[in-house]
Amino acid sequence: MIEVLILPDKKKLKAEKGTDLLTIINSSGIFMNSTCAGEGTCGKCRVKILKGGYKSRSAQFLTKEEEKEKTVLACLTIPESDLELEIPYSSRVEELDILEGEVSRQELEPSSLAENIFSPEPIVEKHFLELSPPVLAEPTADFERVKTALLEKGCPVKEIPLQLLRRIPYILRGAGWKVTVAVCDGEIIDFEAGNRVKENYGIALDIGTTTLVAYLIDMEKQEVISTASSYNPQIPMGEDVITRIIQVEEKNSMQHMHSSLITAVNKMIQKMILEKNVSGNNVYILLAGGNTTMTHFFYKLPPGFIRRSPYVPLLGSAVVLTARELNIRISPFAKVTALPCPSAWVGGDIVAGVLASGIYDFSVLSMFVDLGTNGEVVIGNKDWLASCSTSAGPCFEGGGISSGIRAISGAIEKVRISNGKVTYKTIKNKKPLGICGSGLISLTAQMISERIIQRDGKFISGAPGVTEKGFLVVKGDETRYGKDIYITEPDIKNLINSKGAIFTGIFVLLKELGLTIDNIQRFYISGGLGTAMDIKDAVYIGLLPDIPLDLFVFLGNSSITGEKMCILSREAKNITEEINKKMTYIDLSSNSFFMQEYTASLFFPHTNLDLFPNVRKQYEK
Amino acid sequence: MIEVLILPDKKKLKAEKGTDLLTIINSSGIFMNSTCAGEGTCGKCRVKILKGGYKSRSAQFLTKEEEKEKTVLACLTIPESDLELEIPYSSRVEELDILEGEVSRQELEPSSLAENIFSPEPIVEKHFLELSPPVLAEPTADFERVKTALLEKGCPVKEIPLQLLRRIPYILRGAGWKVTVAVCDGEIIDFEAGNRVKENYGIALDIGTTTLVAYLIDMEKQEVISTASSYNPQIPMGEDVITRIIQVEEKNSMQHMHSSLITAVNKMIQKMILEKNVSGNNVYILLAGGNTTMTHFFYKLPPGFIRRSPYVPLLGSAVVLTARELNIRISPFAKVTALPCPSAWVGGDIVAGVLASGIYDFSVLSMFVDLGTNGEVVIGNKDWLASCSTSAGPCFEGGGISSGIRAISGAIEKVRISNGKVTYKTIKNKKPLGICGSGLISLTAQMISERIIQRDGKFISGAPGVTEKGFLVVKGDETRYGKDIYITEPDIKNLINSKGAIFTGIFVLLKELGLTIDNIQRFYISGGLGTAMDIKDAVYIGLLPDIPLDLFVFLGNSSITGEKMCILSREAKNITEEINKKMTYIDLSSNSFFMQEYTASLFFPHTNLDLFPNVRKQYEK
Ligand code: FES
Ligand code: FES
C-alpha cells in the first residue's frame, strides 16, 4: 500500500501498489477531466507531482516546460512510493452551482409553451377511505373492501405488491378502518393509517451526460418544492456516451456505470427531502428523462448496439419498475420510469422537450433544437414529427475550448469588443473563470464584426488584441485563478465545426422533408449552454437559421420541465407516448448530402450567403 | 445432545436435550398423526418406548394396558437419555398412493360437465418470430421490433421483466433474429433462440388441507402428461385449518407454514418434469386452488381474521406473482396464481369445482357439494350462485374413526353384510388396512339394513358380530398389520354428526333461498372420499337428499379438474372470476334455524322421515 496526498485539497488516500493515479484520484470524490476515460488519449488528466517516485508514460502530450515541473497525465502514471501531488483547477470538473432551477426565457413567453395547458391530474393519486368494518352479513375480504371503496371514488385498482398486501389487515384494524391509499396505474403502492392524502411527492430527474438535475414535486399542491443538481458520476468513465458504452463493453463495468448513477440520484433525493422535511416513504414516483444511452444506463440495459451501425437501442418504450428494484431510496413500491426514446440518438430528454415546447400540438410548423454535445433537431406539427441528430461536440458546454467552462458562476456569458477593448459579463458577476457556450457565441460574433477574425475563423493578422497564443479576453490578474482567459484559432475551428453541424442538421432535415428554412414558423431552443445566449449572435455566426428573431423561443432545460409536467399530469405523460410513436428518425451519418452541406457550412455564417439574407447585409456593412 | 432410534424404520436422530419426541420425529420426515399439532389434546401421537429414560405427562389419555407397555404421547414426552422407540402404523399418516390422476364417474357422463366446452386457448402463448434484422432506414429498438412482430400475430404485449429484457439483444443476434417468445397476460415471460413453441407447459395444483395433487400439463398438446401427489406437509402443524391458523399466530410460524408447502410443491414438480424430461424453464404457469386458508398460506398472507367472527379473509381475488417471488422452481418469470376465494369458508377449490361442474352456466337449478372436512355447498344456475359451509369433521377422509384411513390402496371401500358375515372390497384389492369414507358409508348402510345398529346409531344388543369393542369388520389375521378392523359406537356417532352437518347445510341453504329439495334438478358431488362411494347408500343414511338417483353426478377431485381447465383455456380462467364475483355466502354459524335442524338430522336418515320419502319405504320394509 502507498499513500497519496492530494493538494490543495489535503486529501490523503491509500492505494494498492500498481494502481494508476487517475483511479486513485477518482476514488477520492474529486472529479477530474478525463474525456478518454483513462485511455491516455485525451491529455486532460494533468497533475503535478510535488514529492515522491513514479513511473509515467505521459511525455508525448506534455510541453518541455510541463515536463520540467513534473506535470504528468494521471492515467498514465503509477506511483512507486508515497506521493504528494497537486491537481490544477484546469484539470478539474468545475463545481456545479447554477444548474438547479434554471430560469429561462420561457417566462417571457409562457403562452407559447405547453407547460400550463394540462389538467392537474398527478400520476399518483392518494385517497382517504373511511370504510365500514365487516360484519357477519357483509364479510367481504379486506382487499376487496378497499378495492370497492376506491372504485366508488372513481379509482379502479387491480394490483398490489404482495408485501404491502400482507400488512393490510393490521393497518385497517389498527387505524379503525380509516386509511389512505396511494395508487398509480391501477396498482396500490402505499397503504397508511389515517388521512395522509397531503403527503404525495414525486421526483423529476434529468439525466444529462454531464449533469443531473432533479426536482422534488408536491403532487398535491402541484408545485416544485426543492431542486438539486450534481455532475454525472459517470464522467470519469468517459466524457461522451460513446466512450462510456465502450467502457461498459471492454471493462465489463455496467454495474458500476449504473450504480454510480443511482448513488448520485439518491444523494440528490436525500438533500431535497431533508431540506423540505419530507418522508422518503411519501415519494411515490421518480420520472427520468435522458438521452438513449443514459436511459439504458439508468435501467442497466446493455447499450452496445447503440454505437454500432445501424444504431439500434434495446428499448424504445418506457418500462415501469419499482424503487426497490433500482435501489432508489424512496417509497419501496414507488414507480420508477424513464421517458421513452424514439431512436438511438434521440432520447427521452428530447421527448420531454418536445412536450414542454408544445410543438406536437401546433398547427404551424415548428422546430425544436437541443444545443448540446449532440445537437438533436425535431421538426413537425400536430400531425407529424421528424428528427435527426448531429454530433456537435462539446464546445457549447465549454468543452474543447482553451478557456471553456460550463455555464457556472464566473463564466463569461456576454462579451463586447470595441476598438480592441473587451468588456464582459460573468454569471452571477463573479470573477471570471472561463467562457461558457453563450459567452463563446457572443465573443465570436464580436470578433467577426470587429474584424478580428475572418469568415473562415482565422485571425486577421495585426488585429487588436491578437497575440501569438490567440485573442486575449481577460488578463490573468483579473481572473479567479490568475490565468489568462483567451481564445485560439483551434478553439474557433471547434466552434465552426459545432455550429456547422447543428445548422447542417437543420438544413438537411428540412430538405429531406421537402421543406426550406422559410417554412419554419416557430423555433424552440433548448440546452444548458447559458440562459443568456443572444439569439441574434447565434444567427449572426450561422448557428441558427436566418429567420425573423421573434420566431425564436429559448426554453432552458426543457427536459426537466417536461418530466415535471408528466408527474403533474397523466395527460402529459400519455402524450409522451404519442410523441415517441409519432417521431420518425432520419439518419444523417450515411447521408452524402449532409457531408457536402456540412463542408459548405464551415464558414461564418455559411459559404452560401444566400442562406443568410439578413445576416449578409450585416456582414457586407 | 441425545440420540433417538426410531423403529421399525431404523432411523437415528440427534436432538438437543429438552426437545419433545414429536418435534424430534417430525424432523425425520416420518409423518405422525397429530391433529392438535402437539398441544397434547388429541391423543393421536402414540409411540412405544423400547429403551431409555423419559419424562411423560401422557397418562390421562392412555389405557392401563398402554401405560404398562410404555406407550406415551410423543408431544408430551421428553427423553432423558438416548432412546429407542417404535411408531405404530396407527400413529402414522399413511403413505399416499392413489390420489394422482383420480378417475371419477365423470367419464360416464362427460356431457354434463363443462370440461370440454371451452376453446383451447392456453393461458400462456408461445410465438415463433422470424424478424427482419434492423437496417439504417429501419433501426427500431430491439424490444419494439419484438412487440411489433407479436402484434402482427394478434398478441399485443406491454411488459417484460427487466432481467429478461437485458438478455434480448444477445439472444436476437445469436439466433439470427429467429426467436420464440412466451407471453402471458400481455407480458413476455420467456425469450428463447430458435423455434421452441412446442415446449409450453403448466402446472395445475390442488392444495388440500390434507393432500396436494398436481398435474403437469402440455399446453401445446392440450393434455395432462404427468401427475403427482403428496401429503400437505403442514399436517404436523395441525390437522385442520383452524389449528394451523392458531399455530401461525401463536408460534409465529407463518414462514415455516408457507415454505414447507412450497418445498412439497417443488418436489412434486421435480418428480413430474424429470419423468417427462421436460425442462423446468419451459413451465410457465402454476395455477393453484385451495380453500381460503390454504390460499392464504400459499401466498404467505396473514390468515388470522379468517377464524374470528365475522370471518374476513385478507384476499378474495386472485393475485398474480412470479415463480421467483414464491421460490417455485419453474421458469423464473412464470406466473403463479391461485383461484379466487369467495369467502372465508368457500375457497378457490370450490370455484374450480363449480367451473368443472358447469352449474354456473345451466338454466336448471343445480347443487354442488364438496364432501370434505368442511362440507361446502353451492346452489344456483346461470343467473346466480349461493354458498354455505358446514363443519363436517374429518370422518369422510377417515379421521376420527377407529379404523378409519384415507382412500388409499388397501382401504375398504365397499362392504356387504349378510347374516353377520362381512364381505368387502379394498382399493386395488390390497390386504385391508382400514376403512375409507366410501367404505364407512357402505358399512353403515349395511349395518342399518341388517339391523345391527338402530336409527340413532346405537348397536342393537345381541346383533351378530357386535362385541364389546364394537362391530368387527375384518379380523386381524386378514389385515395388513395384523390388527382388527372394527367400528365403534363413537365412530358411528361421528359419522352421524358429519352426515347431519352436510345434509342440514343443504337443507338450510335451500330454505334461506326459499327453495326445497324438490327444486334441485342436478346434484354434483366432489371430494376425495373414494370414487367408489355408492350414492344410493349415501342417500340411505341421510347424507344426501332423497331425490331421484339419476340426478347425481360424482366429480371426484373437481378442484384439480377446474384448475386444469383454467390452464388450458383463458375463457375458463375468466369464468372463475365471474363465479367468484357472483357467489354470495350465507353464514350458518349464527343461524339458529341451522342449529335446530342439525339436531333433528342426528338420526338415520333423519328424525323427520317425510324428508326421505323413498328411503322411508326401505326403512319400513
Ligand atoms: S489522458 Fe488521462 S484521462 Fe484522458
Ligand atoms: S396429543 Fe400429541 S399431537 Fe395431539
Image (tube, coloured by chain):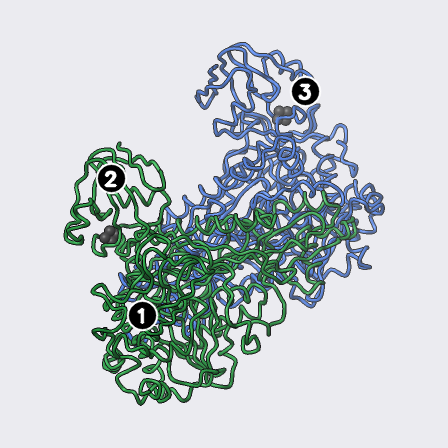
Chain colours: A green, B blue
Alpha-carbon neighbours of circle 3 within 10 Å: few (<14), some, or many (≥20)?
some
Instruction: Please name the amino acid that badge 3 sits on.
Output: Phe
Judged by depth in the image, the label closer to the viewer, 3 or 1, is 1
Q: Position of residue B178 (x, y in %)?
A: 30, 66
Chain label for disc 1: A
Q: Residue at x 57, y 77 (%)?
A: A111
Please tell me whether residue B486 is drawn above or below residue B264 in the rendered image.
above
Instruction: Estimate the x, y position of residue B410 in percent, counting from the top left.
Output: 53, 36
Q: CA distance from mark 3 to mark 2?
A: 90 Å
Which circle's residue, 1 or 2, is located before the other in the chain?
A: 2
| Subunit of label 3 | B
Residue located beneath label 3 in the image: B61
How many C-alpha atoms fall within 10 Å of the one at disc 2: few (<14), some, or many (≥20)? some
Say if labels 3 and 2 share a chain: no
Which residue occupies 53% across, 70% down?
A574
Q: Let me know if marks 1 and 2 both belong to one chain.
A: yes
Q: Tell me if B169 is positioned left or right of B486 in this view.
A: left
Q: Which residue corresponds to mark 2?
A: A50
